[in-house]
Amino acid sequence: MTFSWTPHRFSGGALALDVANSVILRFDAARRIDRYADASAMDAFAGAANRHCADALSHGELTPVMSENRERFIDLREKTDRYFRAEVLGRSTPAQFADLLDAISVILRRSTVGGKSTSLDTATARSALMLATHPEPQRLKICANCEWLFLDRSRNRSRMWCDMAVCGNRAKAKRHYHRRQEEA
Ligand SMILES: [Zn+2]
């Protein structure tokens, strides 16, 4: 099965959230898939983000993470997910916030400035910093179907799913299935 970074995989509304969502079914040990486990997929993410990520253009042209920086990038991804997920659930701690800031600063300290391109890890660190320092608690949500993090940009902030076309329809199909089961 070939894997591709389709627009659906950039439903987070911010680069840092799209990066956090590169782990599929994070809390389902049996079915969990880390899409960055394959380094070539991680590299391809940068190119796809240029096309599909909601705020990619604000970072300039994204380039892949240098191999020596991958570990720090994954560390940032994990701390991003942990902190913002806890934020949505109303149970984030100062320690989680500090861990996130540490992971951000480790990357920013090493990043090079200049040119029109930005490495994916640097851009993700900036995106996470932006989300952390300009929080939008009314908009930050967890998808009711797949548990991805996303920013709800709808006017009345009523979105329940990261992507209506994918998760919204799956949720609808599930409801329909259960209704039919009950009727039977
Ligand atoms: Zn979803």
Image (cartoon, rainbow, N blue to C red):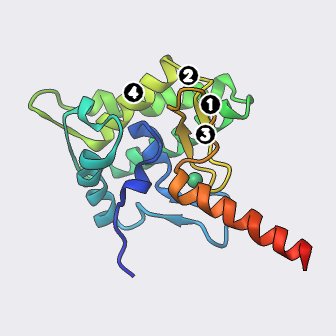
Q: Residue at x 31, y 55 (%)?
A: 45
Q: Is residue 147 left or right of residue 58?
A: right
- Placement of 32 over or under 157, stated as above or below: below
Is residue 132 something one can see in this rendering? yes
Q: Amino acid at mark 4?
A: Ser
The dot on residue 105 is: 4
Which mark sits nearer the N-terminus, 2 or 4?
4
Is residue 65 something one can see in this rendering? no
Report the Cα–Cα distance between label 2 and label 4: 22 Å
Position of residue 111 measured from the top left corner of the image (x, y, whole percent): 24, 32
Q: Which residue is mark 2?
A: 136
Q: Residue at x 54, y 20 (%)?
A: 135
Which mark sits nearer the N-terminus, 2 or 1?
1
Q: Secondary structure at mark 2?
A: loop
Q: Which residue is mark 1?
A: 96
Q: Secondary structure at mark 3?
A: loop
Q: Residue at x 36, y 37 (%)?
A: 124
Which mark sits nearer the N-terminus, 1 or 3?
1
The dot on residue 159 is: 3
- Disc 2 versus disc 3: nearer the observer: 3
Report the Cα–Cα distance between label 1 and label 4: 14 Å
- Disc 2 versus disc 4: nearer the observer: 2
Q: Secondary structure at mark 1?
A: helix
Position of residue 157 measured from the top left corner of the image (x, y, whole percent): 60, 30
Q: Amino acid at mark 2?
A: Glu
Which mark sits nearer the N-terminus, 4 or 3?
4
